[in-house]
Amino acid sequence: MIFGFSIAFLLTAALTVAGALAAALLKNLVHCALSLTVTFAGLALLYLQLGAQFAGFAQILVYIGAVAILVVFAILLTRGAGVPEYRGFSTSWLLGLVIAAATFALLGWAVIKSLPAKVVASAAPAATVQSIGAALMSSYVLPLEIVALLLTVALIGAVIVAMPESRIPKSGADAGGGQ
Amino acid sequence: MTPLAAFLIVAALVFAIGLAISLTRRNAILVLIGIELMLNAANLNLIAFWRFGPHTSGHSDGLTGMMFAIFSIAVAAAEAAVGLGLVIAYHRHAKTTDLDAMTRMKG
């Protein structure tokens, strides 16, 4: 225990923040994507420390398994031939940095200010996968269906947006009007 | 410092770094990465409050914060797919992902 925190928490927190910082500062886009993966893994470990097993494994499956791969594919697909001349930061980077630092200062101030006087040791809420599944199928069934619809629409839309336009079939009226 | 405050500080750091990435980097994919980091920081907040918040109210089944985080993960996945699809479509037309060079959306 260091400063009242367990070693595991300090290590995972440092890993998470270091991965995010590396994603912010590295020049190579692929390196940025890989350090983003490290951050996702650190966040999944933090979820596991909080006792949220299902959220932790969902984080690993969704973010490391899907989103990180998607980011790497997008980077490789949009990389031009040869070594691009790469200017990493925008011209107004100082302003952006100030805004981000001010946001962190505000959030940190609010967290420190609202610390309770004494630590209330609350019992960890029980959230087995069985209870989560039962809740998803009973009281949360409408949000679940809406999310399923949203995912379907979003993925079909992403495929149509990214598809080459020559392969999208024209409707009959458009083809006739063009002649 | 309580454990809850420690998790909230970590989440605030990740959020601030994600915001800094979105505001300072010039590549559109990196801006999407920054948005993903901010969404993840919000998820960490939700899980931390779920773990350390009170669970004594009668009507709640003690799963509300966890459900928020799970639905948030699903929506963030949809957002990443659409955003990266848009970047790829733009790159097909303009051959660039530099945000300073993206000045028009008409193909």
Image: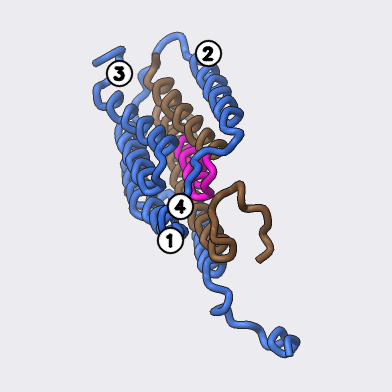
Q: Colour of chain B?
A: brown
Q: CA distance from mark 1 to mark 4?
A: 8 Å
Say what secondary structure mark 1 lies in: loop
Q: Which residue is mark 3?
A: A5
Disc with the residue nearer the chain's start (4 vs 2) = 4
First along the sequence among labels 4 and 3:
3
Colour representing chain A: blue
Magenta region includes residue B26: yes
Q: Position of residue A73 (x, y in %)?
A: 40, 58
Cα–Cα gap, marks 4 and 3:
45 Å
Q: Which mark is residue A84?
A: 4
| Most common SS among magenta residues | helix
Q: Which residue is mark 2?
A: A113
Chain letter of disc 4 in the image: A
Residue at x 52%, y 71% (from the top left corner): A163
Please tell me whether residue A63 is drawn above or below residue A178 in the rendered image.
above
Bin the neighbour count of mark 2 within 10 Å (Cα to Cα): few under 14, some 14-19, many 20 and up.
Answer: few
Locate the C terminus of chain B and report the quarter of the image it occupies. Answer: bottom right
User: Circle 1 marks a residue in which chain?
Assistant: A
Residues shaded magenta: B25-42
Q: Which residue is mark 1?
A: A81
Q: Do the numbered discs 2 and 1 sit on residues whose CB atoms are within 8 Å? A: no
- Label 2: element kind: helix
Mark 4 residue type: Pro
A82 relative to A169, above or below: above
Q: Spatial distance from mark 2 to mark 1, Cα to Cα?
A: 52 Å
Q: Tell me whether circle 4 and circle 2 mark residues in contact (CB < 8 Å).
A: no
Q: Which mark is residue B65?
A: none
Q: Crowding near pointer 4: few (<14 within 10 Å), some, many (20+)?
A: few
Amino acid type shown at disc 1: Ala
Front-most of A133 and B42? B42
How far apart marks 2 and 3 lie (CA) works out to: 20 Å
